Amino acid sequence: MGFEPPQRLTRTLGETYGDAAAAAWLETLPALAGQVLDRASLDAERVMAPGGRSSLVVLVRRSDGSPAALKIAPPFARPDRERDALAHWNGWGAVQLLDEAGEGGLVLERLHPEVSLRSLPEAKALLEAAGTVRKLWVEPPAGHGFETVTERTARQAEAMGSHLDDAATGELTAAALAARQELVSGASESLLLHGNFRQGKVLAGDRAPWLAVGPEPLVGDRAYDLARLVRDRVEDLVAASSGASAARRRVNKLADSLDLDRERLRGWTLFRAVESGTRAVAAGRRQDAELLLEFASWL
């Protein structure tokens, strides 16, 4: 079968890691996928589309006939960190790591990729999301190699600096950078975080009702991990006449349900929304940028 990368994978890798690096890896991907499948004795059923944003996901069968999912990510997306996080969680709140397949390949427990928390009504989805992410917040393993929140956001803040002089984004960017500086300067936590947690990253399973997938793990403040969840279904919030007040209520409700400081969650939500918005501006995704920056302006 063919292993052509889905369009979303091609677009996101180029935007996140640079067109040259993405193109070089994507060119090798069809052959690489075949090699990984052979090495791990896996039979491919189909490529998931739209699939992952930083990896090719293939539904497979193992040599004993059991179902699994093969995830292949480029080295610059650091699949080794995902492997280490999944191994540490060992299936607690997250998909189970079954095996390594080399070349950035991970063999994972087969979930139900067509059923995420986004299929639930909003209130129920947020409740289940909170219960899932709570399980992931554990002490990291000794001698871990995970990034910290401070390190990751420092890189992002540097890229955001070019938007400070822009008439449309300058004021929000300055507010987001100031919020980040205050957050990283104060007392913080050092827990293992998912790093990219949202409703679409929680899938239905057989072993447990809901399990997290696709971590971009790092160590730090729980409020950072929850900030992306706050803006889930942002298009619905922006379309509603009460969107601004609903967004602020969501911050407070999620913070209270997980015993987090409301202002820390608000600050990280602002930073992450503006960071995503300015990145969308740079990539020419105007509609996404407008939604994200309007949401950020409410905070």
Image (cartoon, rainbow, N blue to C red):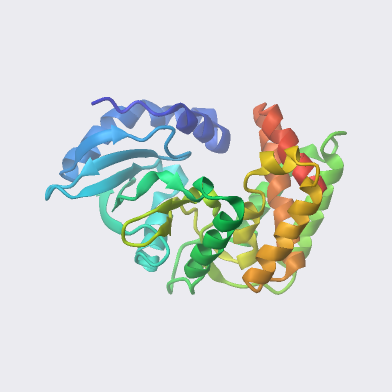
**Residue at 62% in and 73% down:** 189
Q: How many marks?
A: 0
Q: Locate residue 31: give its quadrant.
A: top left
Relative placement, left or right, of 94 versus 229 is left
Image location of residue 77, percent across then percent down: 46, 45
Instruction: Please determine whether, in this image, residue 130 is positioned above or below residue 99.
Output: below
**Residue at 51% in and 59% down:** 194
Instruction: Please determine whether, in this image, residue 11 is positioned above or below residue 183.
Output: above
Image location of residue 74, percent across then percent down: 40, 40
Instruction: Please determine whether, in this image, residue 85 is positioned above or below residue 49.
Output: below
Q: Can residue 158 be seen in this view?
A: no
Relative placement, left or right, of 43 versus 228 is left
**Residue at 40% in and 59% down:** 209
**Residue at 74% in and 67% down:** 262
Query: Quarter holding the N terminus?
Result: top left
Q: Considering depth in this image, is 166 or 194 the residue closer to the camera?
A: 194
Q: Can residue 259 be seen in this view?
A: yes
Image location of residue 236, percent across then percent down: 68, 41
